Image: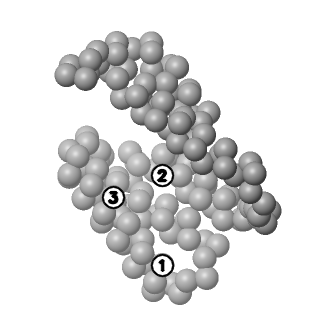
Amino acid sequence: MTAAGLFFAVHGRDYEFGTAARMGPGYFPVVLGWVLAVLGLLVALPALWRRGTAVQVQWNNLFWCVLSLIGFAFMLHLLGVFVAAFLTALLSLVPSAMRLRTRLAVCTVVAVLTTLIFPIGLQMVLPIWPWSA
């Protein structure tokens, strides 16, 4: 978190900062970058003196989640938001022990919410269906 925050805080300075009343394009990356960096330190520093069990990385789950994110990026403009969100949610659930009916319900809810939030709510210019691409 700290590294990501510092990255955005430092590279956001390349843009005009502005003021709190008239924010420039660099205002949010810099301010939120510093906030993220400080939060990262607040999480990391106490953890250095605490003992706990080792973290077990579930590589199978990580693989399918990363693959679904990459798949979404490639499918978005080709298949539209709804279908891409549905298929990538389905892909990310491959390692899950859910029943098929539950998986399809979860994927439908994810696709509906993604469609309602981004192209409709935020009015992002994204195709909703494959035929509207």
Dot 2 falls on a residue whose secondary structure is helix
Tell me the quadrant of the picture where the N terminus can be found: top right
- Are dots 1 and 2 in contact, CB under 8 Å? no
Q: Position of residue 29 (x, y in %)?
A: 41, 28
Q: Does residue 77 appear in the picture of this structure?
A: yes
The residue beneath circle 3 is: 114
**Secondary structure at numbered mark 3:** helix
Amino acid tagged 1: Arg
Q: Nearer the viewer, mark 2 or mark 3?
A: 3
Quarter of the rendering containing residue 111? bottom left
The answer for how far apart the CA atoms under marks 2 and 3 are is 12 Å
Which corner quadrant of the image does residue 129 belong to?
Answer: bottom left
Residue 22: name its quadrant: top left
Which residue is under mark 2? 72
Vertical position of residue 88 compared to residue 6: above or below:
below
- Checking the image for residue 131, the label placed there is none
Q: Which residue is mark 1?
A: 103
The residue nearer to you, when weighing 4 against 126, is 4
